[in-house]
Image (cartoon, rainbow, N blue to C red):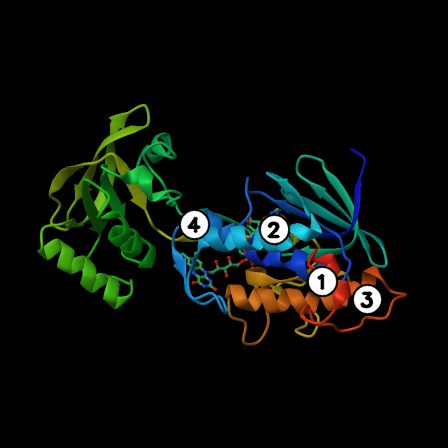
Amino acid sequence: MTDPIRTDALIIGAGPVGLFAVFELGLLDIKAHLVDVLDKPGGQCAELYPEKPIYDIPAIPVITGQGLTDALLAQIKPFAPTFHYGEMVAHIERIGDPAFRCTTVSGKVFEVTVVVIAAGGGSFQPKRPPIKGIEAYEDKSVFYAVRKMETFRGKRVVIIGGGDSALDWALNLQPLASRLTLVHRRDEFRAAPDSVRKMRELVAAGSMDLALGQVMSLAGEEGVLTGAVIRSGDGAMATVACDALLPFFGLTMRLGPVTNWGLALKGDLVPVDTATFETNLPGIFAIGDINTYPGKLKLILSGFHEGALMAQQAYRHVHPDKRLVFQYTTSSTSLQKKLGAA
Ligand SMILES: Cc1cc2nc3c(=O)[nH]c(=O)nc-3n(C[C@H](O)[C@H](O)[C@H](O)COP(=O)(O)OP(=O)(O)OC[C@H]3O[C@@H](n4cnc5c(N)ncnc54)[C@H](O)[C@@H]3O)c2cc1C
């Protein structure tokens, strides 16, 4: 066992909610380390939709997924959190009242007073379509997320799916791609009606193609795609030339090790007390998409609110002998000093 890293709080998950939790904890003198299985911060925002606009962050009319992540990193900088990327927390063991020993799969050990689970949907993974041999093309010609739109400039792109992600990316990538084909098994779409209308207009204008059917197999060599073989409803087979294939079949959320931590669970979610966002285990909190309570909305702004209330209760565990004084950042010189603003 390596020497344990000792700190006040371990935040499991560096998505937007885990990042903002650093800020709320920091204002209350609670030091935090963050662990994430991904190799970067931002959770779903950075991994699934870095270049897409978000319109419902209070006081920010529009910001991309990556933009929000960068802004949160700037906001928490004064608290100098330590990040541990590429690490999955596998075990949590109670060693005090409260105090926990958390161990990652690679054997990194943390001893902390409180644990904040901000694990979103757990380790989320895109659903792989049933296309024989697709694994050989993944991350070379087959992509389940668009990290950088420029990657697809001048390419022949095939997108599979009928939901919002498929239609959104078809509309976003159509101007960049040399040719874009949307493949869906039937002529009905789950996506927003406005997106479907725009897609049909582009197809009618000859600016993109819509193929009704299923991608059965792929043509290419050593991960470099040259075509997708599509079977239409009447059984006819046709090959569409393509350099990049983007299947959008939804995500599978895997809760993973969270199920082994002795938490009361409701389905794949962790029930919490909405006054404190504490779980059934005192000292272990759950905020963001991972938790559930009556009226829960899986929105970033809900996770921010949850982080603020969580920090108040975490303070009582980390600083049991101190009185908690409610303060505004606008008027408290002590808070401004912590933020480096006074
Ligand atoms: C396409 C799309 C568009 C969206 N648009 C909006 C929008 O416009 N407005 C809005 O408010 N919300 C939107 N959302 C939802 C929003 O992204 C989520 O509500 C938000 O990301 C939840 O943040 P989180 O920090 O709780 O979890 P996540 O962002 O899921 O981050 C959780 C992190 O925890 C890590 N993790 C999980 N388990 C472990 C473990 N055991 N050990 C270590 N790390 C772990 C994961 O790798 C992940 O990075 C959208 C979602 C999608 C998919």
Estimate the spatial distance between the alpha carbons at disc 2 and disc 1, rounded to whole Å.
27 Å
Q: Nearer the viewer, residue 133 or 282?
A: 282
Q: Which numbered disc flags the more N-terminal residue, 2 or 1?
A: 2
Q: Relative to residue 298, is residue 203 drawn left or right?
A: left
Which residue is disc 4 drawn over? 50
Q: Residue at horizontal 74%, vertical 72%? A: 327
Compared with 275, 145 (above or below) is above
Tell me the mark number nearer the camera, choosing from 2 and 1.
Answer: 1
Q: Relative to residue 319, is residue 138 drawn left or right?
A: left
Q: Residue furthest top?
A: 222
Estimate the spatial distance between the alpha carbons at disc 2 and disc 4, rounded to whole Å.
17 Å
Q: Residue at horizontal 63%, vertical 48%? A: 257
Q: Disc 2 beta carbon < 8 A from ligand 1?
A: yes
Q: Secondary structure at mark 4?
A: loop
**Mark 3 near mark 1, Cβ–Cβ under 8 Å?**
no
Q: Which numbered disc flags the more N-terminal residue, 3 or 1?
A: 3
Estimate the spatial distance between the alpha carbons at disc 1 and disc 4, rounded to whole Å.
31 Å
